Image (cartoon, helix red, strand yellow):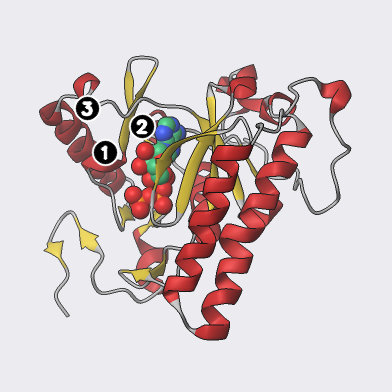
Amino acid sequence: MEKKKNSCSPSEQTPPTESSTIKRIITYSKNTQTLSTQQTKSELMIPTNLLNTLEHTARTTFDEAKEAFQHGNNEVTALQTKQQAIKDLEENTEFSIIGKGTGRVAVTHTCFGQFVVKIALYSPRNKAGFSIDGVSQNQQELWTWDNLPESLQHRFTPVESIHANGRLLVMPTVTTNEEEIPYGVAEEFMNETKLSLYNHDWDAIELDIHTIGKRNGELEVFDYGLPVEPSESLSARGDDRIYDYRKGPRIS
Ligand SMILES: Nc1ncnc2c1ncn2[C@@H]1O[C@H](COP(=O)(O)OP(=O)(O)OP(=O)(O)O)[C@@H](O)[C@H]1O
Ligand SMILES: [Mg+2]
């Protein structure tokens, strides 16, 4: 089948619908001064027709998969629904899949190669009591990015924008090529990041070596969809397994 061409040209874009593009309301109030202009431009960079195609995919990978699961309580059907939608995107459009996780699939396109869009997948599962579904993870990632202490921001890949109520999240592309990220260096970066979080009274549910990428020669955490938050708000959510960098894992 011939691949559907998606134009990069703004003139061929369809107008955004009210629901499809949720404008980023939160501005970078903490660091307006240091913000590069690139960070404010992503909504212009991703043509609306491409966002609409991705939103259509997300309606299947998230909403329809959720419905399939809830109706039949059948994880296999939900999984097939997600896989078919991603396969359709891969085969019938010019998007390329650059990584698959449990809650999100990252895709890119020649129109915006320096960015990925994380498409939400539905999952009924939890990790340490926190939902791993793609919408929850995308919303969490945005929250963390917008609230991170300024001195920690360079350690995390910025969230550029979020669309369709969290079904899509845009961030710069990092390399995850292991040859460019020696294990020991990544491990050291991870430990330093955890310590810096601790020094700000923050905690993380899941930060490991597999969440580190490289961009412009610097290491960054590109997957922080499970909570990275002030320790106080994390413990208020009542999880016993949160790692406390001072005392080790809490044992209940
Ligand atoms: N900014 C990025 N640049 C390049 N690749 C990315 C980026 N973000 C995600 N990916 C790729 O997409 C995959 C899935 O993304 P991500 O890890 O954010 O989703 P997840 O659902 O949290 O995955 P997991 O189940 O592994 O925790 C990653 O393993 C990585 O290969
Ligand atoms: Mg993850």
State the SS at label 1: helix
Residue that appears at 31% across and 58% down: 205
Q: Amino acid at mark 1?
A: Thr
Crowd band around label 3 with a 10 angstrom C-alpha radius: few (<14), some (14–19), many (20+): few
Check if mark 2's residue and mark 3's residue have beta carbons within 8 Å. no
Mark 1 surroundings within 10 Å by alpha-carbon count, few (fewer than 14), some (14 through 19), many (20 or more):
some
Q: Can the viewer see residue 224?
A: no
Disc 1 or disc 3, which is closer to the eye? 3
Q: Label 2: which residue? A: 155
Residue at which label 3 appears? 178
Q: Label 2 crowding class (10 Å Cα cut-off): few <14, some 14-19, many 20+?
A: some
The amino acid marked with disc number 3 is Glu
Image spot of residue 167 (x, y percent):
61, 53
Are dots 2 and 1 in contact, CB under 8 Å? Answer: yes
State the image coordinates of residue 248 (x, y, percent, origin top left): 12, 60
Q: Which mark is residue 193?
A: 1
What SS does tag 2 mark?
A: helix
Which residue is drawn at the image coordinates 59% and 21% (left, top)? 110
User: Which quadrant is home to the N terminus?
Assistant: top right
Task: Give the amino acid type for the residue marked by disc 2 in the picture.
Answer: Arg
Taking the view exactly as shown, the residue that stands out farthest to the front is 1
Dot 1 or dot 3: first in sequence order is: 3
> Viewed as shown, does residue 23 lie left or right of 175?
right
